[in-house]
Image (cartoon, rainbow, N blue to C red):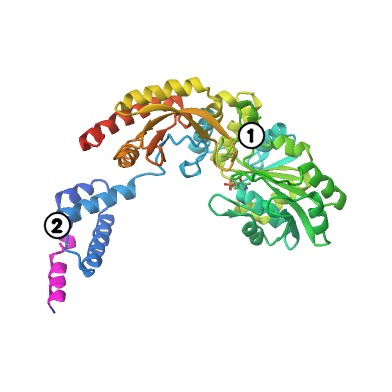
């Protein structure tokens, strides 16, 4: 058949492995990569081309095949995740890696990873120690808790506590708090995974402490409160206060778990934000265990922190799952350094996310103006709002000044905003902006002032790219 013949002849046009191996560009790669890897990549590329030809596509020119192999080698060998500049105005952007770390935290992680460290070694006695000792002291000092334990992330903190303390028991949760947070953390599923049975009480918008009390049975293992950290229910709403749950728990001898999510140690209302419950409050109100993340409002590396009553924390430490969700030396070092900032009362000036949250509007205006000048053309500075994000302060925003491009709904504005967004993402380092309809927005609040030189560079080079495209 004619079609088959044509496909056959296209297959024959594909260069051989040897022929590709002898191409200059590929031979140059032999200085960097082993021969076997290049042969592998060539075979994979030829396989890919055969599949494409079988679908009726033409055989690409040899030069294109060579370039694709080189690009594949480069992409495999590039290290990632790559640093990007977050100009979205979302301070705790989960897709962009949540909290940037303080200089001290970075130095501590660098130190801990360079050589050996006394992770599980008591330097005084010379015998085995415990990896959590120092960070536990800090956490107890800062939160007022009797004991604390650090695991991989908050999801594993909740899973560990439910598994170790409520397996095959019922855990009572308000219907309004059986929620999903971010990618894949759903309270009902974590509960199922732990072997605890979820008992939902009350209604989505209204749950009272009476609802919990009526659901208590001999099978009840714990009461769980989950902070609605990434959404807000408005209007006719109500939930049981933590102190009411603690009183109920005490009366029935049941532990009360408080999943705070964001783990704030500072008063957010000082910055015009909604009050975010603090860890100290939960501990002092008597929660048996409080769970929170290290990389949300705490502003440290990824971690799950458990703070609370010693007899319960001790059970968690001894549970086999604790070993599976333990944290590593570098993150413990970064977390300690972050906690020390709180201890010294310098969190606002040293921890990047708190520097961003507390930065005054005048500074945003000054920086946005400089950015807009670098962009030139139709860039304007306008009022806007930054978000804390990352599963915290759902209703709270911070006033900011934004660089807006494509405002006024002019013809082609959408295209221009999208083209510019793409060009900005292609810079080195990539600059990630916010798109709002036809308008591209850049918010200096989620960018540290020391990154401004890189931002201005990216903006200048993006403008050059756009002028080249003749679309600006
Ligand atoms: C973010 C969040 C979690 C998950 O925390 P990770 O550290 O991302 O695992 C769990 N519970 C609440 C309430 C949260 O806000």
In the drawing, does residue 291 fall left or right of residue 467? right
Of all residues, the one furthest to the bottom in this rendering is: 1
What is the x, y in percent for residue 408? 36, 34
SS at badge 1: loop
Say how many tags the image has: 2
Residue numbers of the magenta segment: 2-18
Which residue does the numbered mark 1 point to in the structure image? 274
Say which quadrant the N terminus sits in.
bottom left
In the drawing, does residue 323 fall left or right of residue 376? right
Q: Nearer the viewer, residue 4 or 444?
A: 444
Image: 379 above or below 218: above
At horizontal 63% and vertical 57% (from top left) the residue drawn is 190
Dot label at residue 61: 2
- Residue 232: name its quadrant: top right
SS at badge 2: loop
At horizontal 76% and vertical 61% (from top left) the residue drawn is 169
Dot label at residue 369: none
| Ligand 1 contact, mark 1 (Cβ < 8 Å) | no
What is the x, y in percent for residue 162? 70, 55
What is the x, y in percent for residue 431? 37, 36
Q: Nearer the viewer, residue 206 or 447?
A: 206
Q: Looking at the magenta stretch, what is its main secondary structure?
A: helix
Image: 171 above or below 114: below
Indicate which disc, 1 or 2, sits on the residue closer to the N terminus. 2
Say which quadrant the C terminus sits in.
top left
In the drawing, does residue 270 fall left or right of residue 201? left
- Magenta highlight on residue 465: no
- Gap between marks 1 and 2, in whole Å? 60 Å
| Ligand 1 contact, mark 2 (Cβ < 8 Å) | no
Q: Nearer the viewer, mark 1 or mark 2?
A: 1
Q: Nearer the viewer, residue 418 or 197?
A: 418
């Amino acid at each position: 058949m004619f079609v088959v013949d044509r496909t056959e002849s296209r297959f024959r046009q594909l260069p051989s492995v040897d022929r590709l191996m002898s191409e200059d560009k590929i031979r140059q790669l032999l200085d960097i990569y082993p021969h076997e890897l290049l042969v592998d990549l060539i075979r994979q590329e030829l396989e890919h081309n055969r599949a494409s030809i079988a679908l009726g596509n033409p055989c690409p020119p040899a030069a294109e095949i060579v370039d694709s192999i080189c690009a594949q080698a480069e992409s495999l060998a590039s290290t990632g995740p790559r640093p990007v500049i977050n100009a979205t105005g979302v301070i705790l952007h989960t897709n962009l890696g949540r909290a940037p770390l303080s200089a001290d935290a970075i130095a501590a992680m660098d130190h801990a990873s360079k050589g050996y460290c006394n992770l599980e070694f008591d330097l005084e006695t010379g015998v085995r120690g415990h990896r959590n000792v120092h960070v536990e002291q800090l956490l107890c000092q800062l939160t007022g808790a009797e004991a604390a334990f650090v695991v991989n992330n908050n999801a594993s903190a909740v899973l560990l506590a439910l598994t170790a303390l409520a397996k095959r028991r019922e855990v009572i949760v308000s219907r309004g708090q059986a929620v999903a947070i971010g990618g894949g953390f759903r309270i009902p599923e974590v509960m199922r995974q732990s072997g605890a049975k979820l008992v939902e009480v009350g209604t989505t918008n209204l749950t009272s402490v009476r609802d919990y009390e009526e659901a208590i049975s001999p099978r009840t293992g714990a009461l769980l409160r989950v902070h609605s950290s990434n959404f807000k229910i408005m209007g006719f709403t109500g939930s049981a206060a933590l102190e009411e749950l603690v009183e109920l728990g005490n009366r029935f001898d049941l532990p009360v778990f408080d999943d705070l999510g964001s783990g704030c140690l500072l008063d957010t209302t000082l910055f015009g934000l909604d009050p975010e419950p603090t860890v100290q409050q939960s501990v002092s109100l008597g929660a048996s265990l409080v769970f929170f993340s290290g990389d949300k409002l705490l502003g440290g590396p990824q971690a799950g922190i458990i703070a609370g009553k010693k007899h319960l924390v001790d059970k968690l430490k001894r549970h086999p799952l604790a070993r599976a969700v333990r944290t590593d030396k570098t993150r413990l070092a970064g977390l300690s350094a972050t906690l020390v900032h709180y201890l010294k009362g310098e969190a606002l000036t040293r921890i990047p996310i708190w520097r961003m949250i507390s930065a005054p509007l005048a500074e945003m205006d000054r920086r946005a103006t400089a950015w807009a000048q670098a962009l030139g053309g139709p860039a304007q500075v306008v009022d806007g709002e930054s978000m804390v994000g990352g599963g915290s302060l759902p209703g709270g925003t911070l006033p900011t000044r934004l660089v807006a491009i494509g405002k006024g709904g002019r013809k082609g504005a959408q295209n221009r905003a999208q083209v510019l967004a793409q060009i900005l993402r292609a810079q080195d380092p990539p600059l990630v902006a916010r798109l709002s309809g036809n308008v591209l927005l850049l918010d200096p609040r989620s960018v540290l002032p020391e990154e401004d030189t890189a931002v201005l560079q990216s903006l200048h080079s993006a403008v050059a790219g756009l002028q080249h495209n003749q679309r600006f």
